[in-house]
Image (cartoon, coloured by chain):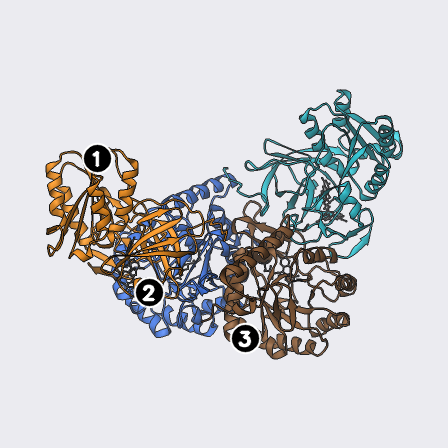
Chain colours: A brown, B blue, C orange, D cyan
Amino acid sequence: MSLGTIVGNIKLRNPLILASGVLGSSYSVLQRIYEAGIGAVVTKSVGPVSREGNPNPSVFALKDINGAINSIGLANPGYKHFREEIKILLENNVKTIVSIFGGDVEEFSEVLVGLSDLPITAFELNLSCPNTEKEGMVLGTDPQIVRRIVENLRKKTKSPIWVKLTPNVTDILEIADAAIKGGCDALVAINTLKAMVIDIYSRYPILGFKRGGLSGAPIKPVGIRNIFDLYEQFGDKIPLVGVGGIAKWEDVFEYILAGASAVQIGTALGVAHPENKIRHIKNNIQKFMKNEGIENIANIIGGAHR
Amino acid sequence: MSLGTIVGNIKLRNPLILASGVLGSSYSVLQRIYEAGIGAVVTKSVGPVSREGNPNPSVFALKDINGAINSIGLANPGYKHFREEIKILLENNVKTIVSIFGGDVEEFSEVLVGLSDLPITAFELNLSCPNTEKEGMVLGTDPQIVRRIVENLRKKTKSPIWVKLTPNVTDILEIADAAIKGGCDALVAINTLKAMVIDIYSRYPILGFKRGGLSGAPIKPVGIRNIFDLYEQFGDKIPLVGVGGIAKWEDVFEYILAGASAVQIGTALGVAHPENKIRHIKNNIQKFMKNEGIENIANIIGGAHR
Amino acid sequence: MSRKITSFDSQPIMGKIIRIEDECEDTKNFFVEMPEKIEGVKAGQFVMLWIPVVDEYPIGVAGFKDEILELGIAKMGVGTEALFNKQIGERVGIRGFYGKPFKPLENVNHLLLGGGFGMTPLKLLINTLKSRNRGDKIHVFEGARTKNKLMYLDFLQNLHDKGEIKFHVCTDDGSWGYKGFPTVALEEVLQEDSQQSVIYVAGPERMMKVVFEIGKKYQNVKDMQMSLADRYMRCGFGLCSACTVDPTGWRICVDGPVFNKEQLEQITDFGEYIRLATGEKKRI
Amino acid sequence: MSRKITSFDSQPIMGKIIRIEDECEDTKNFFVEMPEKIEGVKAGQFVMLWIPVVDEYPIGVAGFKDEILELGIAKMGVGTEALFNKQIGERVGIRGFYGKPFKPLENVNHLLLGGGFGMTPLKLLINTLKSRNRGDKIHVFEGARTKNKLMYLDFLQNLHDKGEIKFHVCTDDGSWGYKGFPTVALEEVLQEDSQQSVIYVAGPERMMKVVFEIGKKYQNVKDMQMSLADRYMRCGFGLCSACTVDPTGWRICVDGPVFNKEQLEQITDFGEYIRLATGEKKRI
Ligand SMILES: Cc1cc2nc3c(=O)[nH]c(=O)nc-3n(C[C@H](O)[C@H](O)[C@H](O)COP(=O)(O)OP(=O)(O)OC[C@H]3O[C@@H](n4cnc5c(N)ncnc54)[C@H](O)[C@@H]3O)c2cc1C
Ligand SMILES: Cc1cc2nc3c(=O)[nH]c(=O)nc-3n(C[C@H](O)[C@H](O)[C@H](O)COP(=O)(O)OP(=O)(O)OC[C@H]3O[C@@H](n4cnc5c(N)ncnc54)[C@H](O)[C@@H]3O)c2cc1C
Ligand SMILES: Cc1cc2nc3c(=O)[nH]c(=O)nc-3n(C[C@H](O)[C@H](O)[C@H](O)COP(=O)(O)O)c2cc1C
Ligand SMILES: Cc1cc2nc3c(=O)[nH]c(=O)nc-3n(C[C@H](O)[C@H](O)[C@H](O)COP(=O)(O)O)c2cc1C
Ligand code: FES
Ligand code: FES
């Protein structure tokens, strides 16, 4: 029995990946999470230049629904600075997926090219952040732009290219199709849902950016639905990475059965002891596989389609 | 101080409305909820002919996120039968908003015309149910279809026409714009989010229809966002009715501050004692208004926009 | 495997069928082991039983001990047949426990009357009454078309033989017990014993309505509690309103399924109308 | 109004400013009344303070009694200035209580050393130690550039006069207490009293680093606990990682802000580097 899984040509020791933006802004925290036993880590999205992100409050929990909302808005030190941290990770054999963003093809290209000499496990294109004016979701809701960006970048690196999709669209299949036609190696879904919280005493939106993205347990049924739909349409064409609201070990299998080859966990790792959570999830994945006679993750990917 | 509010030309004794499909399939339960003190009730959506809806399971709770998922799929007795129940409600002075659906303009028209001799408080067009093959969301994601339906129906009744929008679109403003241009009297947002739950032991989607719609607390931040966006764009043009995840009295004000003139409550009333919940929410609305010196709901509609 | 059930009134949790017994014609007892500790059940409550891919429907609880759920199921259509086709070791989904239970009074005669799968909550009610061990008299009246349709015959006969209950059994065709309806024996008991009594009924609604009318004639009937379990349900917890009765707007699944005499008086649908899956009303 | 706080570590809940005191130059004490019962706080923990429309930032807790939160705030920039402009009766948002607190040992001398707004958690720590009432010696060392910058001067002097603590105060310009750094008095105490001691420090990180190096020289220093509160934070509960330190990847907000000697040894960033809002590392 093995917990290993494969996404395209990337072998992972287990199907758990740290989602972008959570515990991902420094090499040290990424390494810490990797050493806790996760299969791979995705860095916080990095762009062409350093950027402070949106004003605070930019993230808080929503405990009654076991979720969080954030409007960090792609705060990052710029790829030139972050390159040094990526190098440390790669030197320490951390399976590192680098999330990148840009405001157009050129910016995306600049970042990717600026890093593509490094043996990066994969690039993840953030075409789905809802918290910026000109990057992320703004691009990722237009199939033509998506295709153009992916096509352009595909030629410029040997590393696999993953495309992270937003659920905030009428038809995710259309966007996915564009990304596949552009030549990407895996689809990642979902990023956060467009959301907002207002304080009724001050009568102001709480987030400094007003609007934000909802993550955590509340969005799991939406993520499952998206992966299920994507697998139904493209399951034979491209591997899927499921993300959104994974908080329990059961959720990992729910995504795999929906069609994911691996999963990413974000919000649920924002706890006092992410190490314990990772260990707990892994242990229970193992137990479940044993009890259910599952030899291999690959055997059950998309298992809910029949 | 008054709890009253106005949606277009409809006066409501308070801003709470029962959402469609929840406690709405019989005159008796609708009357019960109205008598519990709610401002108005919306019936379960009714269509041209009787229909069983999707196979069971078609609805269950998701307790860890304080929500529910359903795929009832517009089960209803057809407007001819339901007409009799509507008559009883109107005779008993229940403020009754009738939710209707159809697979095209003709079907919508048949239902509306078949009921429009009754003094119905308002018609709510369900252009947002995610659980059918040819009605609801299928129509409500296309601005041209939305406009055509609303335009057509507008001429055929004196009752106000509300349009209920789906959040499962790239741009809800575009759909809203179409509905407004079609001549509707209020916009209602949001219906459920496209979602799904898979059982990892049997490896099957749990809902008989496989896919469903997520409701309850998890979708509140999404609903707030949609109402906020709609108010920003159309606040001076059309009244908004906020719906999605209202579970506490605070949520009512959150929607009103985002821009809603009234709100609908669904999932949260699926409890042992909906009467107590309604009373509790109303009492606290009153207390809050007193404490905060709010004379009138109208004074704070859209109050978070500044 | 350790799986903490934080909330059982949520998505179905999968139990394993560990025993299947033939009970009577077209009726089997299924014993379903729940994966972890869940809260106790009261007689009259039900679960929603999910047969993956096929159907989900309400089933009364006949017993629950050591996390093993006992269900007595009558084959009716596709959904129940799918369960009958299940083997030991297979899993079914359960959510619950839903509904208001029977509320047995104290210091009264307990008169339990049932037919068909209505016997399942009554089985649990008998066990509840026995465990209270208050020395109240327990009469059980069961009727069916024919002997092979009598549920829990051995169980009840055995209790009768031990003197723990008085079992009054009858069939339409006289193939077992006396020939006739269970109301005959019920009335006899009501006439002979002037002690205050509570009548608990579960079975076809027309039959319950008959019992209700009879019960009203007797001064010594302190209350009547009847389970309106012949109703279409979807959610089981009061959300969808598929199961409401007129004119009260009560939901069978949370305001019932067990209603007392005072409530039953107000339900004009009782014994007269049900609602179909479409919401249409239909004469029973 | 009754408002049940089920979870305080969630979206900000609005407290009302009920008192404002001038503490020292550019520093005020704000007393914020929370709307309902919330769980107690430990010295060293902090809240995220939301000034609507302006900013949200971490603030240590100086006191918490009868649901009234005491915060000591130094004016730094736009966010703290916005608070200074608030009137009594206005509301601010609070979420917390976040972070690992000081963990005072027993049967030791407690040596508290602080500067600037670092004094706020130390005030709560002093009150905690006093209420334990174990007779351990408590020394408090405070330093500032000049007299007007000394926080809690009256409070500490008063405790000193009552003999509850030993207060060692100094300024760079000699305008109050002795002229020089608080480490001078600290070393004196460490040299004179051979009793095992724990040093608790909160203040500018360069200063803490100096204290750390000094403390390491003394055998009688059993532990050193320092609050690394000069770090940029967004979430405050361990999600965003804005506040991590190298090379351990510890998050100041949940793995800290208070770290003990053994941990501090491992944090090479300590006293050397912080991270900006962009995530870039910057020399302190
Ligand atoms: C509170 C309650 C407790 C019950 N307890 C038991 C029990 O202990 N044992 C038992 O054998 N049966 C019980 N039933 C009845 C059981 O739910 C039906 O027999 C079962 O749903 C039949 O399903 P089917 O697919 O085999 O039949 P179908 O062919 O689908 O339908 C046959 C009949 O079953 C009923 N039915 C079907 N679906 C539903 C539904 N979703 N909700 C309610 N009724 C439905 C209808 O009357 C229908 O006409 C109970 C019903 C209720 C409401
Ligand atoms: C755990 C902790 C406890 C603290 N306790 C107190 C206290 O009790 N009293 C007190 O006066 N101050 C305290 N601070 C410092 C306080 O957070 C900053 O002084 C405040 O954020 C300044 O905000 P500003 O908008 O006024 O200044 P700005 O002009 O925005 O910035 C001035 C400086 O404040 C710091 N700062 C700004 N934003 C943040 C942020 N989001 N997170 C962390 N630092 C920030 C940076 O060092 C920045 O250079 C504490 C900080 C931390 C991390
Ligand atoms: C605080 C925070 C920051 C995030 N930053 C990014 C980011 O920089 N890039 C990105 O692609 N996704 C980002 N996300 C989205 C997550 O990677 C993930 O898609 C989403 O949160 C859903 O997963 P979860 O429910 O497990 O958190 C962020 C999420 C959170 C909560
Ligand atoms: C069981 C159920 C049935 C519903 N049926 C309908 C319906 O028939 N027509 C409709 O417009 N919306 C229907 N909805 C959507 C609700 O009216 C509402 O838009 C949604 O549930 C969000 O509100 P809530 O979170 O308060 O439930 C249904 C929702 C639920 C949970
Ligand atoms: S079954 Fe849904 S309300 Fe009773
Ligand atoms: S402030 Fe977000 S992890 Fe510490």
Determine if marks 2 and 1 fall on one subunit: yes
Q: Chain of mark 3?
A: A
Please indicate whether residue A237 sits to the left or right of residue A92 in the image.
Answer: left
Q: Amino acid at mark 1?
A: Val
Q: Position of residue A253 (x, y in %)?
A: 53, 62
Q: Which one is nearer the viewer's eye here, A182 or B5?
A: A182
Residue B139 falls in image quadrant: bottom left
Please name the residue that numbered disc 2 is placed on: C85
SS for tag 3?
helix
* Camera-side residue of D224 and B216: D224
Q: Amino acid at mark 3?
A: Glu
Residue C108: mark: 1
Q: CA distance from mark 2 to mark 1?
A: 43 Å
Q: Tell me where residue A188 appears, x and y as whole percent.
A: 60, 68
Question: Which element type, helix, strand or loop, lies under badge 1?
Answer: loop
Task: Indicate the quadrant where residue D257 lies.
Answer: top right
Task: Determine the quadrant in which ligand 4 lies.
Answer: bottom left
Residue at label 3?
A174
Is the Cβ of the residue at disc 3 closer than 8 Å to that at disc 2? no
